[in-house]
Image (spheres, grey):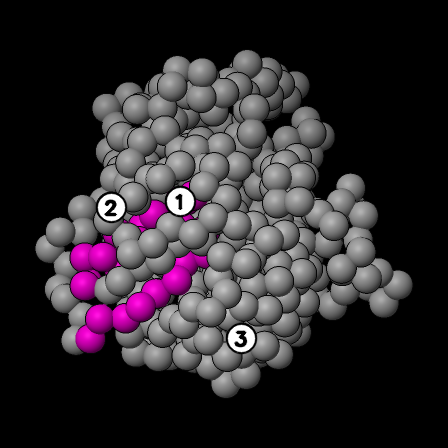
């Protein structure tokens, strides 16, 4: 059976793969506390007893903070490793266990709402359901837009076909070495487990790229960090290429409000509300710095020749044609109609950069060395030189 740590490491290694979705938890602890202030959040009409599976990674802390500010009671269930006892004294209880193993700490407990953040493998849903099925009125599951089968479709919505598991693979006995390459299919099967165990009382959220403070995947953080260094910055393809992402705080706070409304069903959590281009994103990030970065737009064909990959090296971006034509053009109409809101790009960019500056120097250096995602600055210099040379020939 695949361990959470093994799967997350494999997913990170496949960061450039089309099917890799936003991670909601990481095995290592973030380097500082949640950055957003929830103190002025209005109280909910009724206090809910909420169980959050995970809760100490990336999106989870934002959910906890917002839920507490709204007057809810929160219990956490996790391995107590990412941020040991982080919310001790502030939440109702912190239960220790593992979705991939012992879920006994959940036995004989009842909750108004369960929020499932970390689950990737369908076995994790099944393990939790042994204790929780019949003991909650609402199960919320964070899935991913990577479940969609045809990413060339523009305007993908909740009714679009999803990716099935290959008929010759059992998701419950899948070799851990191959699990990450079936990420979308595994999430699809996990969704099916949720629907089977919590019929009529489930909410499945399919986010696109999740960004903001505490994002240690560097799949957005790379841009504020790189632009803040100034100089000539390699930018992907064309300025009017589309891009989509959602601030982790917008996702977390909306999920708590959805719990309060008992809103069930499938929802794409995709932002921003209005179409955004890569140029608008990059210049929006630049606006919160004083570094004076200059962008050089390099065509996709040339980037391919230089082995510069979308998503992995040119983060947030996918080629807006061919099999990824719809990757950054999905529909969030249903979620917006149900109250999903988005903070300004300038807020996300500034808060992410401010948080990045608090990280250990080793982590900051890794961001600009392309250790996780993003293009190493030394490699960026080489590609830019090759591009300029090609223009002269």
Ranked by sequence position, the earlier of labels 1 and 3 is 1
| Residue at the (55%, 32%) spot, across then down | 373
Q: Nearer the viewer, mark 2 or mark 1?
A: 2
Q: Secondary structure at mark 2?
A: loop
Q: Nearer the viewer, residue 211 or 380?
A: 211
- Give the answer, above or below, for where 283 lies relative to 61: above
Q: Is residue 229 left or right of 176 when viewed as pictured?
A: left
Mark 3 is surrounded, within 10 Å at the Cα level, by few (under 14), some (14 to 19) or many (20 or more) other residues, namely some
Name the quadrant of the C terminus.
top right
> Can you give x and y, in whole percent of width and height, for residue 10 in the image?
67, 39
Residue 176 appearing in the image: yes
Q: Nearer the viewer, residue 381 or 218?
A: 218
Q: Secondary structure at mark 3?
A: loop
Q: Nearer the viewer, residue 220 or 382?
A: 220
Residue 54 inside the magenta-drawn segment: yes
Residue extending farthest front? 108
| Residue at the (81%, 48%) spot, across then down | 175
Q: CA distance from mark 1 to mark 3?
A: 23 Å
| Residue on which disc 2 sits | 89
Q: CA distance from mark 2 to mark 3?
A: 28 Å
Magenta segment boundaries in residue numbering: 46-71
> Can you give x and y, in whole percent of width and height, for residue 154 in the image?
56, 67
> Can you give x and y, in whole percent of width and height, for residue 262 in the image?
35, 79
- Give the answer, above or below, for where 304 lies relative to 178: above
Q: Splitting the image into 4 quarters, where does residue 261 fall?
A: bottom left
Q: CA distance from mark 2 to mark 1?
A: 15 Å
| Residue on which disc 3 sits | 133
Mark 1 is surrounded, within 10 Å at the Cα level, by few (under 14), some (14 to 19) or many (20 or more) other residues, namely many
Ranked by sequence position, the earlier of labels 2 and 1 is 1
Q: CB atoms at circles 2 and 1 under 8 Å apart? A: no
């Amino acid at each position: 059976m695949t361990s959470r740590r093994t799967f997350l490491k494999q997913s990170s290694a496949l960061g450039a793969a089309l099917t890799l979705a936003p991670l909601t938890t990481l095995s290592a602890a973030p380097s500082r506390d949640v950055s957003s202030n929830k103190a002025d959040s209005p109280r909910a009409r009724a206090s809910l007893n909420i169980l959050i599976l995970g809760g100490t990674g990336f999106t989870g802390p934002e959910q906890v903070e917002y839920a507490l500010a709204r007057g809810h009671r929160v219990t956490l269930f996790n391995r107590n490793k990412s941020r040991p006892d982080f919310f001790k004294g502030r939440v109702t209880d912190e239960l220790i266990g593992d979705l991939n193993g012992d879920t006994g700490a959940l036995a004989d407990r009842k909750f108004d709402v369960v929020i499932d953040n970390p689950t990737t493998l369908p076995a994790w849903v099944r393990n939790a359901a042994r204790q929780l099925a019949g003991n909650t009125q609402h199960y919320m599951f964070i899935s991913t837009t990577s479940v969609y089968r045809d990413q060339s479709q523009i305007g993908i919505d909740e009714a679009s076909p999803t990716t099935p598991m290959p008929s010759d693979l059992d998701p419950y006995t899948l070799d851990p070495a191959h699990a990450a390459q079936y990420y979308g299919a595994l999430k699809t099967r996990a969704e099916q487990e949720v629907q089977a165990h919590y019929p009529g009382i489930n909410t499945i959220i399919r986010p696109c790229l999740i960004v903001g403070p505490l994002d240690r995947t560097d799949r957005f953080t790379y841009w504020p960090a790189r632009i803040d260094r100034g100089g000539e910055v390699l930018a992907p393809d064309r300025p009017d290429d589309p891009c989509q992402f959602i601030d982790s705080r917008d996702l977390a706070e909306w999920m708590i409000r959805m719990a309060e409304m008992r809103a069930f069903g499938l929802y794409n959590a995709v932002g921003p509300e209005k179409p955004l281009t890569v140029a608008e994103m990059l210049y929006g990030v630049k606006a919160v710095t004083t570094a004076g970065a200059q962008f050089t737009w390099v065509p996709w064909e040339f980037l391919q020749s230089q082995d510069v990959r979308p998503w992995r090296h040119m983060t947030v971006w996918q080629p807006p044609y061919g099999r990824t034509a719809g990757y950054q053009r999905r529909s969030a109409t249903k979620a917006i109609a149900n109250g999903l809101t988005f903070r300004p790009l300038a807020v996300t960019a500034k808060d992410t950069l401010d948080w990045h500056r608090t990280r250990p120097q080793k982590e900051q250096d890794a961001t600009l060395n392309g250790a996780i995602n993003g293009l190493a600055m030394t490699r960026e210099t080489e590609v830019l030189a090759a591009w300029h040379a090609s223009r002269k020939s």
